Image (tube, rainbow, N blue to C red):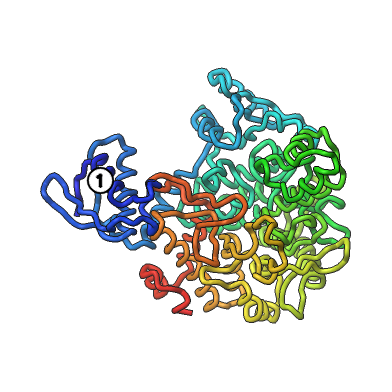
Amino acid sequence: MKFKLHINQTLSQLLAQEDTDGDKKITIDDKGPKSFLLQDEEGNSIAIEGTYQLSNLLQELALSKKENSDFAEINLDEITEDPVKRISRKIKDLYWNGLTRTIDAAGVKKILEDDKIENAVSYLYVPAGDGFAFEYFKNLEASNPTLKVVQLPENISPEYVLSLNKKPGILGLALQTKKDKTDGIPFVVPGGRFNEMYGWDSYFITMGLLIDDKTDLAFGMAENFKYQIDHYGKILNANRSYYLTRTQPPLYTSLIIDIIEKSNPDISWIERHLKTAIKEYKTVWMEQGKRLTPNGLNRYRAEGIGLPFEVEEGHFDDILEKYAPKYNLSTREFEKKYLEREILDADLDHYFTHDRSMRESGHDTTNRLVGICADLNTVAINSLLYKYETDISFLISNYFSDKFIYSNDVVYSGDYWNQKAEERKERINELCWNEETGIYFDYNFKLKEQHYFEAATTFYPLWAKIATQEQAEILVQKTLPKFKMKGGIAGSTKLSVAGVSEHAPVRQWDYPFGWAPHQIFLWKGLLNYNFHNEAQEMIYRWLWLITRNAVDYNGTIPEKFDLSISSHKIFAEYGNVGTEFNYITEEGFGWMNASYQFGLTLLNPDLKKKLSDLTDPDTLF
């Protein structure tokens, strides 16, 4: 049944009656009657009841309004649609499009316009080795007076990156030319203020794209990964000037394998990307003294000078106020002088080495890594690199007859990479596994002891297939209950943050917050070791939380959740991205979208029905 409605008139009446807090959404927090009589010009009428249906009506009207029409035909089936089907459909048909960007003539304005940079001029930096891109963007600059295109030097030092803080900007990504037309290769951003291509977000986003048959976009993500390694030396934290010295968790080989399984690319595509993945492994992760430590395991170790540029004024007050009195300055004055390097302090520089490394880990921030990150062989990075080694072995053995020509004088076999993986697995289990607690801890290679902080990264060895079956059983039976909450697993146990001062910053990657990457790694890990019932439970809990939140809050799909209250309403550093919009979200949030679509591919039909009914997980499990 369809209703032909006057858009502005219906919107005004609906908001006046139901949006009682004036936030341009209809949620359970609004105090309206939660019943709206829908009438069209032909005399048809029906009452739209409850928060969910009313917010759906608001969303459909908002979408119709964008088409610059006075009237809209609203399909009643979309107002009353099963919430699971609606969320999944919106992700597939709307959100991915809303998150897609290109850096080219058509897309550069959208990528440059955000709230991070307040300069009158928008800077676009192009790598030294891409003359074609520099010429393309210089031509674009000529017709855009607010755009300034700068070619980077071949050698990018931390000192040079520091100098760019006075003129921060976006880093160019891959271009393609088809039929004499040059365009940027599309990529998908996380959403909200994260309006650029982020490192590990991109892997999870690509998982979602492949599930939703957005194959061209998935290939674009891979090409832009390759471009970053080839031209910037690493997969960047994000393609901004102040991230040039920082990478993120390595998931490139997982992305390659996912694409192969979904779309079966030709052998030349696999060869190109495998070579680049090996290059990244060798140059980013395996140079001794940088991210490789003497015991053969790895750490996060970002370069850079002074304060991380991306944080807002006041973010580091808890640490800066300890140093400012030493220089007889207020905290604000000290922050300014330290940021501009008028004051040099070796101890504080050391602290920020750890801080940048923590941000490189993707876990920005967690009490687990504050002030110590660069001293730790983290379970996370070594699990990811173990999977790199086994992935590379798999690709060589299955696609190149166990003989991969990396360069003129280097030929690799699958066995070579398997051996590296076995050596890493042995060291992880020796140094990081704690039999008594049943947890994989990070290892402090300087103090030669385990770093006792119970984090969700303990489940990464299940995802990477590092754990023995016995260890897996301990992790599932003894450890998982410590992390499990109504809506999924938290970033850490409550015990691990029990001793943190109430005056300290609320770290968003710790208890009680829940994140999509941790859930996805756990689900895959449980399935790797045949814990199917446990996997179904944990998938259901997370999808229930996303669905419940979207139903109650106008379709909101946030960056993360507070699992202690099963809500997107976060009291923590940085707030919560993906929650600020008018009428309808047209993006969701990248890895949250992906976790929903991925979870639905795994959830059994009976639980999907329970999910549509919003059955409380604590009554099921």
For the residue pair 465 and 313, the one nearer the viewer reads as 313
Closer to the camera, 307 or 474? 307
Quarter of image, res 470: bottom right
Which residue occupies the foreground of this view, 36 or 178?
36
Q: Position of residue 117 (x, y in %)?
A: 60, 33
Q: Is residue 435 left or right of residue 94?
A: right
In the image, residue 173 lies at what x, y percent?
61, 37
Q: Write the residue at 46% across / 70% down.
A: 603
Residue 565 spot, x, y in % from top left? 51, 66
Which quadrant of the figure contains the N terminus?
A: bottom left
Residue appearing at x 69%, y 68% in the figure: 498
At 43% from the left and 62% from the top, the residue drawn is 547
Answer few, some or many: residues within 10 Å of disc 1's Cα (few below 14, many 20 plus, some between 14 and 19): few
The quarter of the picture where residue 204 lies is: bottom right
The one of 268 and 546 positioned closer to us in this rendering: 546
Q: Which structural element holds mark 1?
A: helix
Q: Which residue is mark 1?
A: 13
Residue 112 visible somewhere in the drawing: yes
Residue type at tag 1: Gln
In this rendering, the answer to whether 472 lies above or below 391 is below
Furthest residue in direction left, as rendered: 43
**Res 414 visible:** no
